[in-house]
C-alpha cells in the first residue's frame, strides 16, 4: 500500500514508481446527478510514529451549505490515535474531537450550542467517516486490504455519536484512465447502516471514485475517468438536493 512506502530506500521507491504517481495528496470533484456541487481534498504525511492526515470538503447546493475540515493522527497500522473535525453546516458551527481512551473511543461533539460526550466501543479497524471525506474513504480501503475486508467500523459523528459495522463486498475489476492512460480499477461496495457506497480504487488502494447511488452523489479524483462511467441511480432532479436527513446537529457520517 502506498503509505507503507514512505521510508523505503531509494531503490525500493524507484521500483514502486507506477503506484506512487497518485501521490499522498489529491483533489476531488463532488457532483450530484452529474452536476458539480463541490470539491474535496486530502493530504497524508508520514511521521516517525505513523501518519498525519487532513481533509477539506466544501459543498453548496439547495438546502445544504457544508464545509468541514478534518485533521487526524494515525499510527503505523492506520489506526486512529486522535482526530479533530470542524465545520459549518447551514450556518451552524460543528466541532468533534475523538481519541481512544481506556479501551473505549471518546467522542466529544459540539453543535448548535450543545455538547455531547460519547464513550464508544474501541475497534482497531474504526474510521472516522464524515460526509464526502475522500481521505477517510482511502483509509478505509487501506484497512480493508490489511484486514481482508473484515472487522471494519465507521465512527459516526452525528447527534450523540455511534460506531457501526462496515460490510465490504468485492466486485469485478473495471477499467479507467488516469491522466489519459488506461489503468485497472478495483471495485468494492461498502454497506454502512443500510446505505451503500461504491468505491473504485487503484491497484495500491488509492481512492479514485466513490458513488452514493441512493443520493446521486459522486466523488471523483481529478485526472481519473471511469470507463464506462457508473450508471446514475435515478433521473436527475431539476435542482441538486441535499442528502435526506441532513441537519445541523453535527457533521453526518457518509451514508
Image (spheres, rainbow, N blue to C red):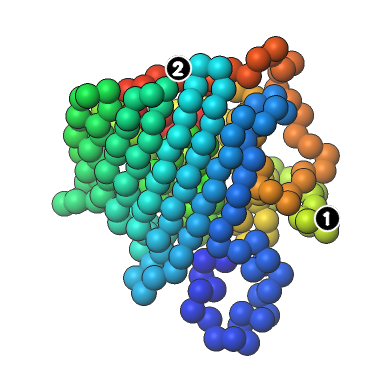
Task: Tell me the element at label 1.
Answer: loop
Q: Is residue 89 left or right of residue 57?
A: left
Q: Is residue 191 left or right of residue 183?
A: left
Q: Is residue 145 above or below residue 226?
A: below
Q: Is residue 155 above or below residue 3?
A: above
Taking the spot 30% from the left edge, 37% from the top edge, the residue there is: 95
Estimate how packed mark 1 is, as few (under 14), some (14 to 19) or many (20 or more) residues with alpha carbons within 10 Å: few
The label nearer to you, 2 versus 1, is: 1
Pick whichever of labels 2 and 1 is earlier in the sequence.
Answer: 1
Taking the spot 22% from the left edge, 24% from the top edge, the residue there is: 113
Residue 150 in view here:
no
Point out residue 108 in the picture as x, y percentages from the top left corner: 23, 38
Point out residue 57 in the picture as x, y percentages from the top left corner: 50, 40
- CB contact under 8 Å: marks 2 and 1: no
Residue 27 in view here:
yes
Taking the spot 22% from the left edge, 43% from the top edge, the residue there is: 106
Q: Is residue 180 above or below residue 29?
A: below
Q: Residue furthest left?
A: 102
Q: CA distance from mark 2 to mark 1?
A: 38 Å
Quadrant where the N terminus sits is bottom right
Estimate how packed mark 2 is, as few (under 14), some (14 to 19) or many (20 or more) residues with alpha carbons within 10 Å: few
Task: Tell me the element at label 2.
Answer: loop
Point out residue 240 in the picture as x, y percentages from the top left corner: 63, 19
Point out residue 191 in the picture as x, y percentages from the top left corner: 53, 33
Q: Quadrant of residue 178?
A: bottom right
Q: Which residue is mark 1?
A: 180
Q: Quadrant of residue 22?
A: bottom right
Q: Is residue 101 left or right of residue 222?
A: left
Q: Which residue is mark 2?
A: 245
Camera-side residue: 157 or 241?
Answer: 241
Amino acid at each position: 500500500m502506498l503509505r507503507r512506502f514512505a521510508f523505503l530506500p531509494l531503490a525500493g521507491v524507484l521500483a514502486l514508481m507506477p503506484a506512487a504517481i497518485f501521490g499522498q495528496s489529491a483533489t476531488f470533484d463532488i457532483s450530484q446527478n452529474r452536476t458539480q456541487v463541490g470539491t474535496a481534498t486530502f493530504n497524508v504525511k508520514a511521521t516517525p510514529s505513523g501518519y498525519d492526515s487532513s481533509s477539506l470538503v466544501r459543498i453548496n447546493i439547495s438546502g445544504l451549505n457544508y464545509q468541514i475540515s478534518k485533521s487526524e493522527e494515525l499510527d503505523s497500522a492506520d489506526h486512529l490515535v486522535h482526530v479533530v473535525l470542524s465545520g459549518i453546516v447551514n450556518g451552524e458551527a460543528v466541532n468533534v474531537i475523538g481519541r481512544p481512551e481506556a479501551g473505549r473511543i471518546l467522542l466529544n461533539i459540539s453543535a448548535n450550542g450543545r455538547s455531547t460526550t460519547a464513550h464508544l466501543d474501541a475497534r482497531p479497524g474504526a474510521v472516522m467517516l464524515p460526509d464526502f471525506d475522500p481521505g477517510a474513504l482511502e483509509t478505509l480501503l487501506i484497512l480493508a486490504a490489511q484486514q481482508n475486508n473484515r472487522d471494519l467500523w465507521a465512527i459516526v459523528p452525528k447527534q450523540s455519536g455511534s460506531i457501526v459495522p462496515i460490510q465490504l463486498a468485492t466486485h469485478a475489476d473495471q477499467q479507467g484512465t488516469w491522466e489519459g492512460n488506461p489503468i485497472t480499477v478495483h471495485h468494492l461496495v461498502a454497506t454502512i447502516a443500510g446505505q451503500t457506497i461504491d468505491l473504485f480504487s487503484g491497484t495500491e488502494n488509492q481512492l479514485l471514485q466513490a458513488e452514493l447511488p441512493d443520493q446521486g452523489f459522486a466523488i471523483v479524483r481529478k485526472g481519473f475517468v471511469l470507463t464506462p462511467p457508473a450508471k446514475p441511480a435515478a433521473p436527475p432532479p431539476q435542482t441538486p438536493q441535499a442528502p435526506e436527513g441532513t441537519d445541523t446537529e453535527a457533521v453526518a457520517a457518509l451514508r
